[in-house]
Image (cartoon, rainbow, N blue to C red):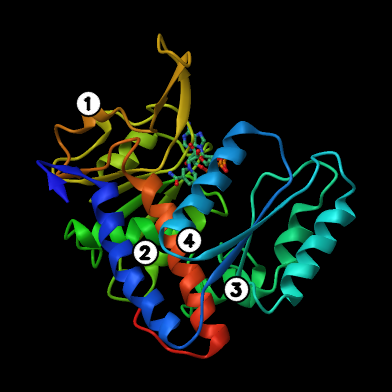
């Protein structure tokens, strides 16, 4: 999974998907087929792409997927009703509402209304609470994927100083929470940085592990990385470029300069991205196993 110091997220993801196939086969033997419902209420091309990638990944692993698409200008009640239907549907194990939702929708109500047992994103307040309490039901997909990446590269979190750049509810906060847990893949000392942090460079330079999740292109360069650090780049930023599409995707880390001091570094694309989808599949299989009360190895 490492090519020099570059950690291949696709390779790590493929390994996990192979393991998942076995769990899915075991569920199949018990007459259970995991099923994920995706809900899209947006015409944003990036959201459409994410949803179709998730559906394709399900197909590939023989996870059933159902898709509900709502007009972006439909009344909010249509989305709330759709969620109620999916909550009540015994054939649906996991529900994912693609964010962002349009302005007329109360995003917090959406997160609260998904059945916590089907909340494969792990954003329901009950699941957030369980994570913070050290008893996670579903770990949010991106931070969970990052834990798996660190593990695959033999990066020790115990006793390490991890600097998380970003405090969003979907990446930064759950990442910091997982890293401080008293668990084999936790036990780190964690610093969380955000847009009001003074002197970001002095924070990141002290880190054994840098998790960059700011959504700001190439915010962190090699001068901000200490020798031997592990650098995980979550950022996916479109910047204008002389390409067919007129843009290219870059991370929050300036890969070329950070690659020098880092012991381990993830590229963009091909680092965290594939892991996020894989951990969504993982959570869907877990949801199916829990709901059918059939235990499988996960
Ligand atoms: P948000 O915009 O929700 O959060 C960004 C965080 O970074 C905020 O806490 C913000 O601070 C902080 N921040 C912004 N600019 C700076 C800065 N200059 N210095 C320090 N901190 C800063 O983003 P997300 O967490 O949703 O996503 C982060 C990035 O990761 C995005 O590029 C997104 O596309 C990508 N992403 C990739 C995924 C993948 O699978 N590869 C999955 C999810 C996200 P403040 O709170 O003060 O505003």
| SS for callout 3 | loop
**Mark 2, mark 3: which one is toward the viewer?**
3
Q: Give the distance between the C-alpha atoms of the residues marked 2 and 1, in whole angstroms.
A: 27 Å
| SS for callout 4 | helix
Q: Which residue is depicted at the point 50% across and 85% down? A: 31
**Mark 2, mark 1: which one is toward the viewer?**
1
Q: Give the distance between the C-alpha atoms of the residues marked 2 and 3, in whole angstroms.
A: 28 Å
Of the numbered discs in the image, which one, if any, rests on residue 179? Answer: 2
| SS for callout 2 | helix
Q: Give the distance between the C-alpha atoms of the residues marked 1 and 4, in whole angstroms.
A: 30 Å
Q: Give the distance between the C-alpha atoms of the residues marked 3 and 4, in whole angstroms.
A: 12 Å
Mark 3 touches mark 1? (CB < 8 Å): no
Horizontally, residue 65 falls left or right of residue 242, namely right
Name the one closer to the observer, 104 or 258. 104
Measured as percent of width and height from the top left, residue 174 is found at: 49, 60
Of the numbered discs in the image, which one, if any, rests on residue 280? Answer: 4
Where 42 falls versus 183 (above or below)? above
Mark 4 touches mark 2? (CB < 8 Å): no
Q: Which residue is depicted at the point 28% across and 48% down? A: 9
**Which of the 4 image quarters holds residue 64?**
bottom right
Measured as percent of width and height from the top left, residue 219 is found at: 39, 29
Q: First in sequence, mark 1 or 4: give its number.
A: 1
- At label 3, counting other C-alpha atoms closer than 10 Å, the crowd grade (few under 14, some 14-19, many 20 or more) is many
Q: Which residue is depicted at the point 19% across and 46% down? A: 229
Q: Which residue is mark 3?
A: 93
Mark 3 touches mark 4? (CB < 8 Å): no
Where 144 falls versus 133 (above or below)? above
| SS for callout 1 | helix
Q: Which residue is mark 1?
A: 256
Name the one closer to the observer, 53 or 120. 53
Measured as percent of width and height from the top left, residue 285 is found at: 47, 73
Res. 43 visible in picture: yes
């Amino acid at each position: 999974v490492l090519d020099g110091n570059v950690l291949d997220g696709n390779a790590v993801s493929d390994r996990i998907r192979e393991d998942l196939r076995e769990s899915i086969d075991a569920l199949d033997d018990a007459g259970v087929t995991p099923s994920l419902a995706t809900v899209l209420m947006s015409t944003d091309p990036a959201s459409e792409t994410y949803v179709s990638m998730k559906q394709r990944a399900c197909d590939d692993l023989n996870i059933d997927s159902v898709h509900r698409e709502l007009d972006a200008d439909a009344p909010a009640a249509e989305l709330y009703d759709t969620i109620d239907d999916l909550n009540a549907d015994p054939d649906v194990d996991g529900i994912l509402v693609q964010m962002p939702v349009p302005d007329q929708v109360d995003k917090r109500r959406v997160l609260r209304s998904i059945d916590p047992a089907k909340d494969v994103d792990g954003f329901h307040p009950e699941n957030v609470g369980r994570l913070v309490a050290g008893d996670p039901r579903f770990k949010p997909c991106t931070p969970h994927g990052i834990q798996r990446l660190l593990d695959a590269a033999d990066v020790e979190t115990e006793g390490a100083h991890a600097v998380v750049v970003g405090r969003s509810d979907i990446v930064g906060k759950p990442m910091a929470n997982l890293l401080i847990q008293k668990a084999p893949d936790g036990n780190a000392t964690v610093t969380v940085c955000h847009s009001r942090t003074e002197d970001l460079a002095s924070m990141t330079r002290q880190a054994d592990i840098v998790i960059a999740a700011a959504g700001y292109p190439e915010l962190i360069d090699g001068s901000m990385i200490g020798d031997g650090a592990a650098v995980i780049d979550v950022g996916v930023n479109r910047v204008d470029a002389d390409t067919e599409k007129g843009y290219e995707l870059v991370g929050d880390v300036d890969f070329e300069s950070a690659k020098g001091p880092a012991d381990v570094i993830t590229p963009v694309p091909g680092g965290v991205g594939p892991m996020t989808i894989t951990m969504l599949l993982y959570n869907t299989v877990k949801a199916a196993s829990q709901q059918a009360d059939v235990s499988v190895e996960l």
